[in-house]
Amino acid sequence: MRFFDAAQESSPRYYGWLVVALTFTTMAIGGSIVSTFPIFYVTFLDEFGWSRADTALAFSTSMVTFAIAAGPIGALIDRFGPRVVIPSGVVVLGLGLTLMSMVSSRFSLYLYYGVFVALGVTLIGMIPTSTIVSHWFVRMRSTALGIAHSGRSAGSMVLVPLCAFLIAWVGWRSAYLFLAAGIVSILLPLNLFLHRNPPQREEIERSGDSPSPQSWTLARALRDRAFWLLFFSGIFQGISFSVVGVHMVAHMVDVGLTTIMAAWLLGFMAILRAVGGIGGGWVGDLVGRRSVFVVSSLISVLGVVCLMFITSDRWALGYLFVFLYGIGAGARGTSFVSLKADIFPGKSFGRILGFSQMGAGLASGFGPWLAGYIFDVMGSYRWAFFLVLAMNLMSIVTGMIATRRAAHPGRAK
């Protein structure tokens, strides 16, 4: 890897860009497993006859696992680095997917998906990825994070239709075994051999990139008002994002779309989330990450409105939904994490990011179950989607207040 030796992050030979490519690949192949749950969700409903609330509780359990594990995993990535944490996550995820092929009861579904798969995804997912990339980049942080995070969406573009095909061809149990084998065989060697420690902050500053004004600790962040505003902004967004993510395919099927068409729309949205994440990151580095956060959040709200009114006669709203929600959610996710890194820079960012995400994880666990319960009682997702709209707006307001002082070194405000 001698080619990747340049010190400045603006150089294509900077090793950080290889790290971005590696994290992109890991998120695409392993992290995108989360996006396949709506496809398997419909299959579980058909095969086992469980209620929507009971079945969605598996995803809710996974979000609780994420919430509980986020802080400790952030500390692990700060302490041991990616060469230990990421390969461990790949192994745990492979084990969890193998166990999923043996699901026979709701308890086993909750245990295998909600604990093992969720823990594996968390060990390789957003917390480690954001921490690693944020340590490698300062001036181009939002762009780098946008590329890395878009891996999950890019992977979903392939994985969601692939899972629908595999389920129809060989059944859902064999589909899970296929996923387990592919993920471990590809991601384990890559993450064992290509990761290395990022440059020290002093090296980045000497290379000509803007310096970080202060180094935050977790204890200091917990005493800061911005941390708690971001914490609650994440809670509100966690509820809304998880409701849409888990129930959108079921809603589309309910109103007359085929499962295959819904799966392809989900895959198309993954493309747009990738585009939104990368484009939003690049625009955020140019004109301001806070502005991108607000605008992209509002765009995703418009997407939810379109989802509410999809019918078999108004199927075109499905495409408008995936366009608006995909672009908006992708750009919002990148800008939100970048703003956290701008506000709380330093070697403890993994811990800070992990603990700041705990509320979002718990809320993401509650949201799908609540939406399923609302459907079971009301026979419709309409009131669940009204809840999504309210949570989105509250997330925007708290996020705007929290990030007023955020300024990327340079022009982001």
Image (cartoon, grey):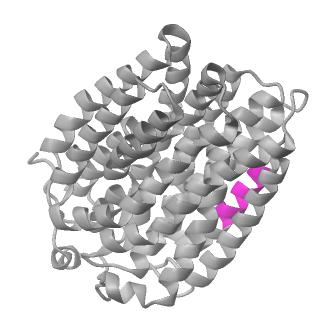
Residue 270 vs residue 70: left or right?
A: right
- Above or below residue 54? Residue 258 is above
Q: Residue furthest top?
A: 169
Point out the image quarter for the N terminus. Answer: top left
Can the viewer see residue 266?
yes
- Above or below residue 335? Residue 85 is above
Q: Write the start and end of the magenta stretch as one range.
A: 295-304
Q: Residue at image x 60%, y 31%?
A: 41
Q: Residue at image x 58%, y 45%?
A: 57
Q: Residue at image x 28%, y 78%?
A: 346
- Above or below residue 316? Residue 153 is below
Image quadrant assignment for residue 238: bottom right
Q: Residue at image x 30%, y 65%?
A: 72
Residue 223, x across and y down, in percent? 42, 91
Is the magenta region chiefly helix, strand or loop? helix
Residue 279, x across and y down, in percent? 53, 54
Nearer to the camera, 81 or 64: 64
Residue 117 vs residue 172: left or right?
A: left
Q: Residue furthest right?
A: 313
- Circle count: 0
Residue 298 colored magenta? yes
Nearer to the camera, 239 or 51: 51
Nearer to the camera, 19 or 63: 63
Residue 132, x across and y down, in percent? 28, 60
Image quadrant assignment for residue 43: top right
Residue 24, x across and y down, in percent? 36, 45
Residue 120 colored magenta? no
Can the viewer see residue 278?
no
